[in-house]
Amino acid sequence: MPRTLDSQITLEKTPSYFVTREAPRRISSMSHETKLIVVVRNPVTRAISDYTQTLSKKPDIPTFEDLAFKNRSLGLVDTSWNAIRIGMYILHLENWLQYFRPSQMHFVSGERLITDPAGEMGRVQDFLGLKRIITDKHFYFNRTKGFPCLKKPESSSQPRCLGKSKGRTHVLIDEEVIEQLQEFYRPFNTKFYETVGQDFKWD
C-alpha cells in the first residue's frame, strides 16, 4: 500500500480477498485498524453470473446444473465448485471475524448498488467517516448495460461505466434449479443476516 497522510484514505480493491483464507491474517498484520468494504449479492444470482462469465471464455464447459449439483434429484449441491462456495458468505465472514471487529466491516448490497447507487455510496461514505460528496447527481442509468454509470457533474468528460465483461445477459436456468439453490443457501443467508445485522432479502 502507498504511504498515506493522516488526512487521506487509501482504497484498494481485490474481489478475491473475501474468500481467500490467508487474507484476513495478512491484512490484519499489515494494519489491524483497516476498514473493510464487501459488496455482496444474492448468492444464486452471483453463481449464475459467475458461470455466465466463465462460459463466455470457455464455451465447452458442462452445464450450470451439472456443475452446481452432485446429485440434482437428491438436491445435493456441490460446494466444492467455486461459484457455489463463494456465495456461502457466512463461512468466509467467520474467518474475517477472527481478525477484525464487526464495526470494521461494511457490507454493500449489490442489488441496491444498482437500484440506488447514491444511497449505497452514502452509507459507504458514512462508514469511512467522510462527508457525503457523492450523491444522486453523480449517477445516471445506462439502459444498454442495465447498470448505473458514474459521472462528474462539473466535468464534460465521458461517464465511467462498467467494462465489457459486465452486464452480460445471464444464461437461462431452470426455475426448479434456482429454487433448489435458494433452499440450499437459506440457512447460510439467515446466519449471515444475523451476524452482520442486515437483511438483504434474498429469499
Image (spheres, grey):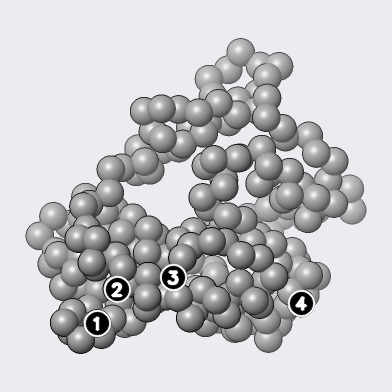
Foreground label between 1 and 4: 1
Question: On the image, numbered disc 3 is attached to which residue?
Answer: 87
The residue lying toward the viewer, choosing from 76 and 35, is 76
Residue under the image location 24 percent in, 61 percent down:
175
Question: On the image, numbered disc 2 is attached to which residue?
Answer: 180
Circle 4 SS class: loop
Residue under the image location 33 percent in, 72 percent down:
181
- State if disc 4 and disc 1 touch (CB < 8 Å): no
The amino acid beneath tag 1 is: Gly
Question: On the image, numbered disc 1 is attached to which residue?
Answer: 75
Q: Is residue 70 visible?
A: no
Circle 1 SS class: loop
- State if disc 2 and disc 1 touch (CB < 8 Å): yes
Compared with 64, 2 (above or below) is: above
In the image, 161: left or right of 31? left
Residue under the image location 52 percent in, 42 percent down:
114
